[in-house]
Image (spheres, coloured by chain):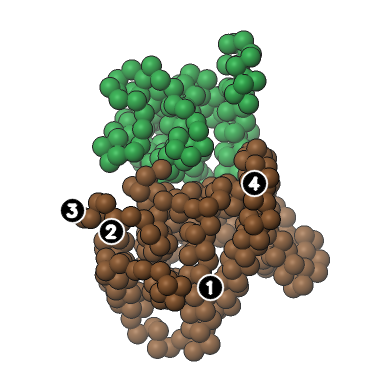
Amino acid sequence: MSLKLSKLSKPVRFCLITCVLILVYLIIAIPFKVMSVIPGFTDIRPVMLLKPVYGIFFGIPGCIAFAIGNLIGDIISDSLRWSSIAGFAANFLGPFVFYVFWTRISKTPFSLRTGKSILKQLAVIVVSSVIEALIITPAVKLIYPEIDMLLLFITIFLNGAAFPLMLGIPLMILMQEELGFKPITR
Amino acid sequence: MNRLQANLCLVCVTLCWSTEVIIFSCIPDNVLPFATTFICNAIASVILAVCFFKRVKKEISTSGKKTLLRCLLLGLLNCGYNVLYLYGLNDFDVSTGAFTFSMTVVVLPVVLITMRKTVGAKTWASVVLVLVGIVVALGGNIASVPPLGLLLMFMGCVVRAVFIVKLNEYAKEHDAVSLSVFISAFVAVISFVIWLVLQPNTFAEIPWSGTIIASLFIHAYFIVAFAQTLNIFAQKRATATEATIIYTLEIVFSLIWGAVLPETLIERVVPTPFHIIGALLIVAGSIIEIVEFKGNRRLKNVS
């Protein structure tokens, strides 16, 4: 797969990776859109576990795929609103924070082999989720003025933080240590 | 994967398993567990086989027959303990059944000893704490349970303990993804046979809806394909006892879901002080087993 990919030109490879990542996003996200778990308010979004994975292992194509995947998910579940623009920006920035941290800010390359590195990752998860919640909450409030802003902020933050923490970290350990995926380096 | 990572992965596996009840709450009671087991394992097996075709092909070419026979054994053990639990749990209420389910941790060291494998003092200390935790949580409820139900649950725990020991042994020898593919495939086949016997109309008996299909796919992705594969990878580094002790955290997660999540997702259970003390003892037992104490860092991972 990697050999064949390397033969392709850079833009084609970029588009191909983005499309595959969107597909993976949708395969995981769509069942949860069908199964409305908290009707009328929000849904539980385990697909958020892909946020650090896309940023760290796939870089910019991963960030774009995450944002487009979320937008397509909104269209499919008939929840496309003006706030989806903020959702698009937030879902691009979510994985982008991981990409920037591990390629530009951190002095050590990405690894989850020690308690310290896991704590670092935890901090990035919190920062990324706060940024997402700060972008999406005011946008939704503009459209639905009656909504409880604090509750919405907490829900978006928890969705953005809990799944990358509980499922994303083990998935990244598996990908890096056992399945041979290489994180993007500086 | 190092030991810390393996233990983290096992905690994640346990967390995924604990959500099973939430996912299955979207499936009507008239759908047999064998039907859901067949469908979910078949989906997971196909997804994994397609995604990791090269690994599976390589495993078959190097030790195909041996791998298949071992996976068949694991598949039979898996179905065996699930059937025993299924019928045993009929005699228990939700919380009592869940705590009884954790008894595997007590049975496992005995199974290991009968297989002439060593069990360290730290493990015994963990087992005692977890056992005390289970007994405290069960309280007086255990006295009202019919002996047949208790016997079935005990047999289920013995079969599960053998399954964990064997899985731990095979995970160190074979490719984890291939093991996961074949175990799922065999579990799917065995479940289908039982389903066919109990409900000859099979698929026609299921009241298909978007929610049921979504729940089955979610279960197939997270509980079978992801959690099972992660579990086998983690078992390459962790010991069988470490794994079993971490698995007991499932009851702690279940208690948290029951207390925190809305009733649209799960049957609310208000934990009693006994449940909380029992859960804390189980957590303490797990921490003792997981944490490497000073001067104990060079311990080898032996079953």
Between the residue at mark 2 and the residue at mark 1, the CA separation in whole angstroms equals 25 Å
Which residue lies under the disc numbered 4?
B62
Tag 1, which chain?
B
- Three-letter code, disc 1: Val
Between the residue at mark 3 and the residue at mark 4, the CA separation in whole angstroms equals 41 Å
Image-quadrant location for residue B251: bottom left
Image position of A96 with respect to A25: above or below: above
Q: Colour of chain B?
A: brown
Between the residue at mark 3 and the residue at mark 1, the CA separation in whole angstroms equals 35 Å
Tag 2, which chain?
B
Task: Give residue B90's position: percent from left, percent from top.
Answer: 55, 78
> Which of label 3 and label 4 is nearer to you?
4
Tag 3, which chain?
B
Q: Colour of chain A?
A: green
Q: Is residue A87 left or right of residue A120?
A: right
Task: Give residue B52's position: percent from left, percent from top.
Answer: 62, 39
Marks 3 and 2, the one that precedes in the sequence: 2
